[in-house]
Amino acid sequence: MFLRCGLRTSQLRQRQDARCLAAAIWLARPIHWGLGLVSQAVKCAIVVYAVIAMAVALSLPPSTQAGPGVNDPASRVRAAINSLRFVAYTPTDLTIVAGQVHPASRERIRKDLTLLREDFQGLITYSCADGVDEVPAVAKALGYRALIIGIWDPLSDREFRNAKRLVDAYPQLIVGISVGNETLLAERQQWPVLRAAIQRLRAAVPGVAITTSEPFYYYLNNDPADFVAVQDFLLPSVHPLFQPWFDQASTAQAVDFVVRVAGLLSARTDKPVLIKETGLPSGPPGTRFTPSAQAEFWTSLIAQLPKLPGLGVAYFEAFDHDWKEENARQEFGAHPEEGYWGLYTAGGDPKAVMTVLRKLWRADNLPGKATAVPVE
């Protein structure tokens, strides 16, 4: 359920390669800084992408959206991005394997969020069902200041009812709702269905910013044509790991990829942009994915990300989830890295990345301190 399954099939990877046109504008540059790292085939592919992408980018009109107004729901999201640290969160006792759901419990959610509260003030969830709908109540009690809650299934009446109930109960805490997670990429629904779900929810909760979440190139290519216009703010994923050049790139190049995408996304719209998912996993052992590489990625990204109002990145993700690896194996083959995305282990132990991030946050006075501007 919370597995980014669309990126795991060969067919979708091929479609991703074909559609990831805008990325090549800047991909060509960092990759060619280290020509020895890439094969001739990859170099040629990048050049082809760059030519097409430049044509696409030049054909897209600049953003025509007016700046945020006083009554604009997205203004609360913008304020939260500017002042708070967000983390993508799935409860540690929630499991979904072979269609069998073990729901999250309020007790475990409280334990998880108590641990995370030391470093984070904002949460992003993926569902309003299976116990995840308990998150706002616990978050409110623990002093979290902003939530972007998720609806996994755009056609789920239960999730829509829960989302409406939660907004009514916690109107100051919930600043945004994401309808779907990589729904178009995974072909769970088509755009007209997803767009209708976004519009339906907006009518039900007019004071809350509504969006969806897809890979970055949907936004840069603005495909479908009204994709960006329908959303109140942008919540893209930017995963270097799933790009065709990743296996031959360094961690520094992966970071550069995300930084450049972030800049392009911010330049394409006046709407707030919060990168929902990015990063590197910390395992499994014996692969290039190590705790030190994960730490290097995040510290470099936070240091290099453009300091622009309304542009931010959420930390993906809070905890490891072993069951995601099993889901990947059953549907898409072996992807053992799926169980290692967390900043914390499944048992709640902080990884090396948390030690270095805390030093960086303290040294640079990055968003998230108690003196930050309120989002209410």
Image (spheres, rainbow, N blue to C red):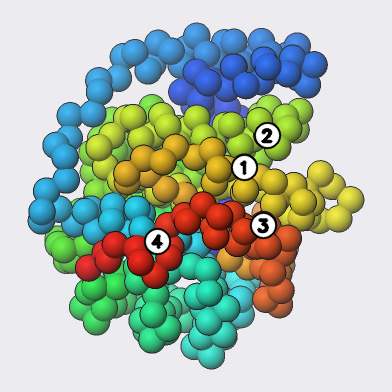
The crowd level at tag 3 (other Cα within 10 Å; few <14, some 14-19, many 20+) is some
Q: Alpha-carbon distance for marks 2 and 1?
A: 8 Å
Q: Alpha-carbon distance for marks 4 and 1?
A: 19 Å
Q: Alpha-carbon distance for marks 3 and 2?
A: 17 Å
Q: Are marks 2 and 1 in contact (CB under 8 Å)?
A: yes
Give the labeled residue for mark 4.
84
Give the labeled residue for mark 2.
252
Looking at the image, tell me whether mark 3 or mark 1 is earlier in sequence order.
Answer: 1
User: Quick one: quadrant of the C terminus?
Assistant: bottom left
Of 119 and 240, which appears nearest the observer?
Answer: 119
Q: Are marks 3 and 1 in contact (CB under 8 Å)?
A: no
Disc number at residue 356? 3
Of 40 and 310, which appears nearest the observer?
Answer: 310
Looking at the image, tell me whether mark 3 or mark 2 is earlier in sequence order.
Answer: 2
Which image quadrant for residue 128?
A: bottom left
**Residue 133 percent coordinates (x, y):** 40, 78
Q: From the viewer's perspective, is the residue at label 3 or at label 4 nearer?
A: 3
Kind of residue at disc 3? Val
Give the labeled residue for mark 1.
300
Kind of residue at disc 2? Ala
Residue at 47 percent of width and 81 percent of height: 131
**Residue 305 percent coordinates (x, y):** 49, 40
Of 41 and 297, which appears nearest the observer?
Answer: 297
For residue 35, side relative to residue 342 (left or right) = right
Q: Alpha-carbon distance for marks 3 and 1?
A: 11 Å
Q: Alpha-carbon distance for marks 3 and 4?
A: 18 Å
Kind of residue at disc 1? Ser
Q: Alpha-carbon distance for marks 2 and 4?
A: 26 Å
